[in-house]
Image: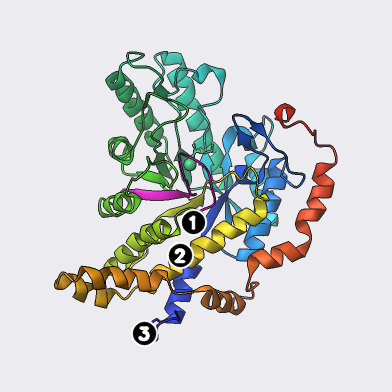
Amino acid sequence: MSIPQRVDEQALGLRLDRFQIETPSWGYADTGTRFGKFLQDAAARTIDEKLADAAEVHRYTGCCPTVAVHVLWDFPPGTEPEALAARAAQLGIRIGSINPNVFQDQCYKFGSLANRDPEIRRRAVQHILDSIEIGRAVGSRLLSLWFADGTNYPGQASIRQRKQWFHEGLRAVHDALPGDMRMLIEYKPFEPAFYHTDIADWGMACAFARHAGPQAKVLVDTGHHLPGCNIEHIVAFLIDEDMLGGFHFNDRKYADDDLTMGSIDPYQLFRILYEITAAEVQLGHDLDIAYMVDQSHNLKPKIEAMIQTVMTAQEHLAKTLLVDHAALARARACDDLVQAEQILKDAYQTDVRPLLADYRRARKLPADPLQAFRESGYAARVARERGAGKPRDGSSYA
Ligand code: PSV
Ligand code: MN
């Protein structure tokens, strides 16, 4: 199916120009499952290498100028945030969202902001406040919060008490935000907690954000939903409440699988992005949403997988920009369900790859970023450099 004549390709290009996607530092490092890690020679070992890899993704795609950082993983003691920001700038990118980590230290075994020990709650808040300072130092305007807090057994703790502790902690964090920094609250139904999770779904995240203050919004990680969940409905609802702050893009088959965006259910990705486009068309302006990838590819080569993700995101946004909104309104006005669905499907089934190739050529980018990266030799070169001293046993490689 070809691009319909009524589509303004210039406007479509300009919307794509404004669709910037943040990639995660942790997506360039060796990762695994709880059963072990399979190492890749080319995987980044340090934050400098992660930044270099992120810069490669931006070089070929032109739409990934920022990198999300995870404070404990990327700022080992002695790291100068300003120096890191300067190194990113030299590579042509910037530090994006700051992700505090109040889940891996031993003290958080029974929770962070919901820990029954006030000293641990205080420590968790302090770490987040320190993360805000890092954000300030690197020029970031996004604090992205995810908590592993929860319980494993009925009776283990008072769910209501823990909720109140969360309100307190998040309010304290919000009070410390600079005026131009936004805080995003991410939810997840389970894992690592297996009975109840303190911020388990969008409604809880939304209530916590509202209670915390006006700079707090909800972050939707597409992998953090139970099977069958209608994610686009959540997205539409949050948009209408002016509470959608950002995404962590990935795909899932079973749980939080961290699979490549659109690899399992591309039509779902289209339906999610369509809700954004529909709202933007109706409102006449872009929504202020942070688009971020949260994927750790255990088996795929990391940079290639990231480029593949970004291209998939652009393709699906482009498809939503082809929807004939006027025809859809007419179909809805006479309850023509078949025609309404067909209008979405026509857009979804259009092959936008030639259009995107032209779009990229016009911006002096490779028409096929993935192919261009593959031909660049970067992966083989860094594999030689980084793979040399790497232990062969994944379990002993931190
Ligand atoms: C948790 O599953 C999560 O989605 C959060 O966003 C973390 O920051 C990220 O993954 C990395 O572990
Ligand atoms: Mn996430």
- What amino acid is found at the position of numbered circle 2 in the picture? His
Q: Position of residue 238 (x, y in %)?
A: 29, 50
Whether residue 125 is in magenta: the answer is no
| Span of residues in magenta | 242-261
Residue linked to disc 1: 262
SS for callout 1: loop
Whether residue 1 is visible here, answered yes or no, is yes
Q: Position of residue 393 (x, y in %)?
A: 76, 31
- What amino acid is found at the position of numbered circle 1 in the picture? Gly
Badge 3 vs badge 2, beta-carbon distance below 8 Å:
no
Residue linked to disc 3: 6
Q: Quadrant of the C terminus?
A: top right
Q: Nearer the viewer, residue 64 or 378?
A: 378
**Seen from this angle, which residue lies furthest bottom?**
5
Residue linked to disc 2: 316
**Seen from this angle, which residue lies furthest left?**
334
Badge 1 vs badge 2, beta-carbon distance below 8 Å:
yes
Left or right, 20 with respect to 31, comes to: left
Q: Position of residue 119 (x, y in %)?
A: 45, 14
**Gap between marks 1 and 2, in whole Å?**
9 Å
**Gap between marks 3 and 1, in whole Å?**
27 Å
